[in-house]
Image (cartoon, grey):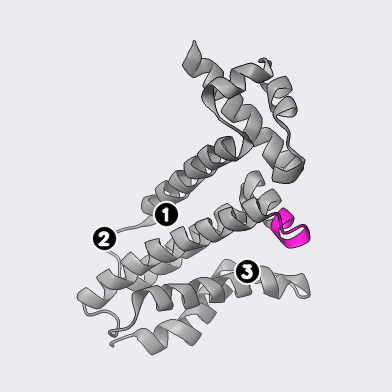
């Protein structure tokens, strides 16, 4: 029964964070949505921050699973890198909690949210770094700083997906891939 209550609390908190953001979510709201007493929440979590971090940890695991699902060891580095990045960035636009967190970070700058958004970015950079290391070892790409290269790749993708469409018509997935190869991959390629 405890596991069921804990899951009810996690589900309710996820809904509340997704709808109202981190700052506006209260433990009272979570208790009401979960249909449990507020004291029940405190048997599992010390505070809102601890509950929030558990939800974000699950989100990061979900993102990693999504990235691993699109990887194919038989495909070249560039195809895998392209697929993984697009999957992770699509995840950011389709997952309601991510949308709300990005919005709250931009509009309010809540420190806990800024920290989480940075953690998500660091996770993507670390994951991409490992793919880049494999590309270097296989000889598909030039020797480079994997972490810095992953950061540049991520920022290019974010710019092409999010920043571009603030004032212009959104790019198609194929266009983004073409620009990605033109501006970045041609410079890294060993071929």
Label 3 – label 1 distance at C-alpha: 18 Å
Residue 71 within the magenta-colored segment of the rendering: no
Residue that label 1 marks: 67
Report x, y in % for residue 190: 28, 87
Crowdedness near tag 3: few (<14), some (14–19) or many (≥20) residues, C-alpha within 10 Å: many
Q: Quadrant of residue 49?
A: top right
User: Which sits in the foreground, 21 or 99?
Assistant: 21
User: Which sits in the foreground, 178 or 165?
Assistant: 165
Q: Residue at x 60, y 22 (%)?
A: 41
Left or right of 162? Residue 157 is left
Crowdedness near tag 2: few (<14), some (14–19) or many (≥20) residues, C-alpha within 10 Å: few
Report x, y in % for residue 69: 38, 50
**SS category of the residue bearing label 2:** loop
Q: Is residue 31 above or below residue 115?
A: above
Residue that label 3 marks: 161
Residue that label 2 marks: 73
Report x, y in % for residue 65: 40, 47
**SS category of the residue bearing label 1:** helix
Q: Which numbered disc, 1 or 2, marks the residue closer to the eye?
A: 1
Report x, y in % for residue 164: 69, 75
Left or right of 24? Residue 47 is left
Range of the magenta residues?
103-110
| Magenta highlight: main SS | helix
Label 3 – label 2 distance at C-alpha: 26 Å
């Amino acid at each position: 029964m405890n596991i069921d209550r804990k899951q009810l609390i996690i589900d309710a908190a996820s809904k509340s964070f997704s709808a109202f953001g981190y700052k506006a979510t209260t433990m009272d709201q979570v208790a009401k949505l979960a249909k449990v007493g507020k004291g029940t929440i405190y048997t599992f979590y010390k505070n809102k921050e601890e509950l929030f971090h558990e939800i974000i940890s699950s989100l990061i695991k979900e993102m990693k699973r999504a990235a691993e699902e699109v990887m194919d060891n038989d495909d070249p580095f560039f195809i895998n890198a392209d697929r993984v990045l697009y999957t992770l960035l699509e995840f950011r636009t389709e997952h309601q909690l991510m949308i709300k967190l990005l919005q709250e970070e931009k509009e309010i700058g809540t420190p806990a949210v800024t920290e989480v958004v940075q953690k998500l970015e660091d996770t993507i950079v670390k994951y991409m770094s490992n793919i880049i290391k494999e590309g270097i070892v296989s000889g598909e790409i030039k020797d480079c700083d994997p972490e810095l290269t992953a950061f540049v790749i991520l920022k290019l993708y974010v710019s092409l997906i999010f920043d571009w469409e603030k004032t212009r018509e959104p790019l198609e997935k194929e266009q983004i891939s073409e620009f990605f190869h033109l501006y970045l991959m041609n410079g890294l390629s060993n071929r």
